[in-house]
Structures are given as C-alpha cells and as structure tokens.
Amino acid sequence: MDQDAYEALKEIPNRREILNPLRDESLLSETFHENTKLNRLNAPEYQRRIEGVLGRPELVQMIRKAHKRYSVVEDRVALPAVPPATELEQVIRRRRSIRSFSGEPVTADELARLLFYAYGRTGDRPAPEYFRAVASGGALYPLEVYPVVLRGDGVPEGICHYNAEHHRLDLLRGGSLLPQLKEVLHGSGIDLDHAAVVVVLSAVMRRNLFKYHDRGYRMVLMEAGEVAQNLTLEATSLGLGSVSMGGFFDDELARLLGLDEVSEPCLLPIVLGRPRRSTE
C-alpha cells in the first residue's frame, strides 16, 4: 500500500478498526518474524545446532526419510508412472539447487524473462486490477523484487528494483556489491564469487496485514514461495542454475538494499548464474 492509499483509508467511517493493525506494535506476526531473524549474535548457536544434527547418524538417517507412511490403510492404489512429457514437466524434473557457477554474466534478455515470469504482470486488465504470475491473497501483491547484479551483459552492476508495473529495472545503487553481499549471505558451498545475480524478495507487510492482520503473514510467505518457484523454474528452462538461501543476516541485508528492516523485511535471497561445467 502506498502513502496515497494509506491516506485514503483515513476517510472511511470504520478507519480506526482498519488502521489499527498498521500501527499495532504487538502484532504476533511481526514479533515472530523479528524473533526468527538471523544476526551475528544468534548465528553461532544456529550453526552449532546444525552441526550437532549432522553429526548424529540416526538424525541424518531420519532426514533422508522425509515422507510419511501409513502402515494400516483401507486400500492401496498404484499410480501409473509419469515420465516427463511436456516441456514444463521436463523443467520441473530438472530443477535442482546449483551452488557452483561459471562466472559468466546474466544477459538483459535472461533477466527480463526471469523477473517477468517470477512476478511480472501477466494479465491484460489495467491497474489496479491487473494480475501477476502468482496467486496473491486479495490480489494485494505485497512482495518486492530486488536483483543485485554481479555480472551483467546489457544490464548494469548494482542493486536494482524490478518495477513490475512498467517491466523495467530501476538502478538504486551502481557498482560491484560482491564484498558486501558476502558479508551478509552465508551458504555452505555456495559460490558467490562466480554468481551472476542475487535476487532478493522482500515484503511490504502493511500492504497485506492492513486487510488480513496476522493471518496475512502466512499469505505473504506462501506468495514468496510461489515467486521463488517461478524464478527457479524459469532459470532452469534458460539453462541457468539457482539456489535459495536460508542463511543471511536479515537486517544487514535489508540495510544493504536501503530497506526498512521492520516494515519491509527481506524474505529470501536467490543466487543465480550459469552452472560451472564439470570439466572446469
């Protein structure tokens, strides 16, 4: 919700009831999100916990059985095998997390496709009734997309914002940001030095929570998952590799992008680049 829309809410009769969620500092969703952020103080404890899990064979074995089984059921119905047939199905089957990159740049055409099919305006209706490439609670579209270009062919290096309304990049800060990114992103074995672009998804929370309150927090996270899947599938179809990162210092990444870490927190950085060939 932009400032004009926020001001417009003040003119409606039940404005107090609607505006309160925007100003309520005790929102459970905000408290939860703040308490689950990664920072330099709690990161060592998270790391110790991860290492503790991976150091116990019985837990590793349990992780490898990530599915549920019913031993007693009324009937079992065998399904026919589903080999890849359509182009979409083949892309879904090929999608894997890629952590090693060649250092080749992303082209303007590739970045345009990645962003458009991730969160672009795919409907024909005019604003504000246009639709995008994902389902969104109330068609509110609370997410924002920030490509940080590390190596670009036809696109400048630096922090950009994807303007979905006009399908363009707005350069917010030019120049190489690799050293700064390496300070705030932490992924085991992820080759940031040779990646082409890091796409960061953020959320303008009040754009959703003013309507759905705490329940809207779930919708925001679901929407981020849809965008990430669109992005990684499109990357796969273009011959690019991608990996979504759970390890990042939330507030430091937000500040690097010039965002307010509370009202527009970062949800997920996705690293993309051309996969390193096995002979390299």
Image (cartoon, grey):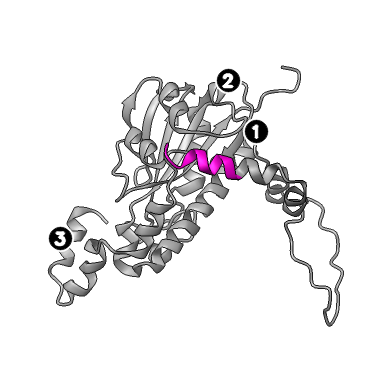
Q: Main secondary structure of the magenta part?
A: helix
Q: Give the number of the disc on residue 239.
A: 1
Instruction: Please tell me which residue is depicted at 82% across the width and 79% down the height of the picture.
Output: 73
- What residue does disc 3 label? 7
Query: Secondary structure under badge 2?
Result: loop
User: What percent of the width, then of the height, locates residue 217?
Assistant: 41, 62
User: What percent of the width, then of the height, locates residue 110?
Assistant: 53, 32
Which residue type carries mark 1?
Gly
Range of residues picked out in magenta: 40-49
Q: CA distance from mark 3 to mark 1?
A: 46 Å
- Quadrant containing the N terminus is bottom left
Q: CA distance from mark 2 to mark 3?
A: 47 Å
Q: Earlier in the sequence, mark 1 or mark 2?
A: 2
- What residue does disc 2 label? 103
Q: Give the number of the disc on residue 267.
A: none
Instruction: Please tell me which residue is depicted at 59% across the width and 45% down the height of the picture.
Output: 49
Residue at the top extreme of this rendering: 280
User: What percent of the width, then of the height, locates residue 213?
Assistant: 34, 68
State whether residue 125 appears in this view. Answer: no
Which residue type carries mark 3?
Glu
